[in-house]
Amino acid sequence: MNDRNEILNKFYNEACDEDTRLDPKHRQLEFLTTDRYVQKYLKPNCRILEVGAGTGRYSLYYASQGYKVNSIEYVQHNLDVLKSKITDNMNIVAEQGDAIDLSRFEDNIFDIVLVLGPLYHLYTEEEINKCINEAKRVCKNNGIMMFAYLPNDSIMISWALLKGHLKFGYDNERFDQNFKIISEPSEIMRAFYIDELEKIMNSNNIEKINNISTSGVAPHFRNIIDNLSEEEFEIWKNYHFSSCERKEVQGYSTHMLYIGKKISR
């Protein structure tokens, strides 16, 4: 068992309840915002691939709307939960697999490819480029690809500051002199600067459509957000929707979503 396999299976089996992660108010914005942008590109008979499907929050949602969905999930536990929720009226195939190898699929067959987790857990330039290029390969010409990723500065806030790890991180070289998070499998999460991620996509010939904050700063203020009334949460949600494309607020968002297009050649 390789290091990434062992570490991620342990993390999602023991430390992270992926199935309930998006339930609290401070996490709901991530799903609501992602879906808000996916809906812009959905068409009748649209075929969707989700890579890194987790326990199926997105895949099952779109399958329930009548779309044909293929789901690939790396962690067996998450895949088992996903499969347990499939109903007879859903046109969905869920399989175990790795984002860096989608060889089970032919070229140019999906209208939308959602990569909403793998870039959190890929650590080398080779792995990252393989993930992007596999998504691009199976996407139709002029199709849409969406890649979720974690901004570096947000992790400095959520992990180093709010969880009290500033001195520990400094003493143990968990970030460099420019406060770039050192990303390796033992640290679980891979962080990107926003400009860094955009350069990687450009180098892989992905045409940028948008780059948005899906969660904003809500997870940093989870106790406040979770205790908002429904009316207050609706106001905050609308504020977030109105600001999620503004660069000045994106760096401190806990989750970002890069939306790109496969160029017909």
Image (cartoon, grey):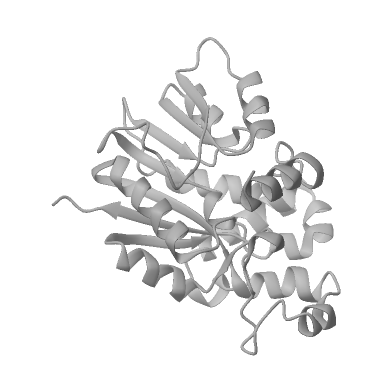
Is residue 157 depicted above or below 92 in this figure? below
Image quarter of residue 254: bottom right
Residue 128: image x %, image y %?
A: 45, 59
Quadrant in the rendering for residue 19: top right
At 72% from the left edge and 76% from the top edge, which residue is drawn?
A: 174
Looking at the image, residue 7 sits to the left or right of residue 128; the answer is: right
Q: Residue furthest top?
A: 88
- Residue shown at 64% from the left, 74% from the top: 182
Dividing the picture into quadrants, the one containing residue 86 is top right
Q: Using the image as rendered, state which of residue 16 and residue 134 is in the foreground.
A: 134
Question: At x 46% / y 57%, what residue is drawn?
Answer: 127
Residue 212: x and y in percent read 48, 61
Residue furthest toward the left?
A: 265
Residue farthest front in this picture: 1
Q: Residue at x 61, y 66 (%)?
A: 253
Res 24 seen here: no
Q: Is residue 166 left or right of residue 259?
A: right
Quarter of the image with the N terminus in it: top right
Q: Nearer the viewer, residue 5 or 203?
A: 5
Viewer-proximal residue, 138 or 58? Answer: 138
Above or below, 12 relative to 199: above
Q: Indicate the position of residue 160 as horizontal and vertical percent values.
A: 77, 75
Number of numbered tags placed on the structure image: 0
Camera sees residue 101:
yes
